[in-house]
Amino acid sequence: TRVGRGRPTDSSPTADDPPRTDSTHGLNPEPRAMAQGEARVRAFMALVGERMADLALTRVLPDLRVRMAVDGVDSWLISVRAGVGSVELESAGPSLSGPAECVCASTLDALERIASGRLKPALAAVTGQVRLSGERRVLAHLKDVLG
């Protein structure tokens, strides 16, 4: 409804208003929100990297390579070779050091819920919150590193 001199009484857009592009109106996400999401992903993967550097966790693991892709951000290669773990950002495309046995793609929200124990990995895979390809059992070896 309009009151007085034709000004709208609420913040509803009119035909004369330019389209809104902030995240509060469900159109394009705000660049700041995207940067915050990317920062959260990088912090999460840094934590995984710290855990992979812990020889007490990785020395008992078999050699493995898992590609972890986080929707809209980047992908990382999580690997263990001779008991030494590492995490590398794959911003320039897939690693040249070989293919991964398993590829896991997900949103950051789903990964955080799995890591905190609020979401079971099997349920996440069945409901499509996590998409897996390749040797899925390889992920079972990383449960202590990811969670």
Image (cartoon, rainbow, N blue to C red):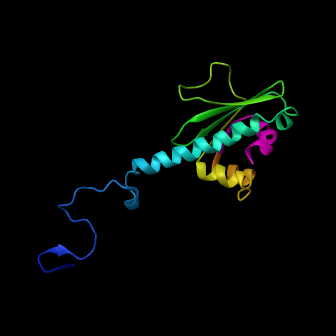
Magenta stretch: give its range.
131-147
Q: Is residue 115 above or below residue 134?
A: below
Q: Nearer the viewer, residue 26 or 51?
A: 51
Front residue (pair 136, 66): 66
Residue 128 seen in the figure: no
> Residue 134 in the image: x percent, y percent?
71, 33
Q: Which residue corresponds to the image point at 21% horizontal and 60% vertical from the top-left?
A: 17
Looking at the image, the residue that sits furthest to the right is: 60
Q: Residue at x 65, y 39 (%)?
A: 46
Q: Residue at x 54, y 29 (%)?
A: 91
- Outermost residue, bottom side: 3
* Picture quadrant of residue 18: bottom left
Image x and y of residue 133, in percent: 68, 36
> Does residue 132 sit above or below 32 in this rendering?
above
Quadrant of res 113: bottom right
State the residue in front, 93 or 5: 5
- Per the picture, the main secondary structure of the magenta-coloured stretch is helix
Residue 2: image location, x then y, percent: 18, 78
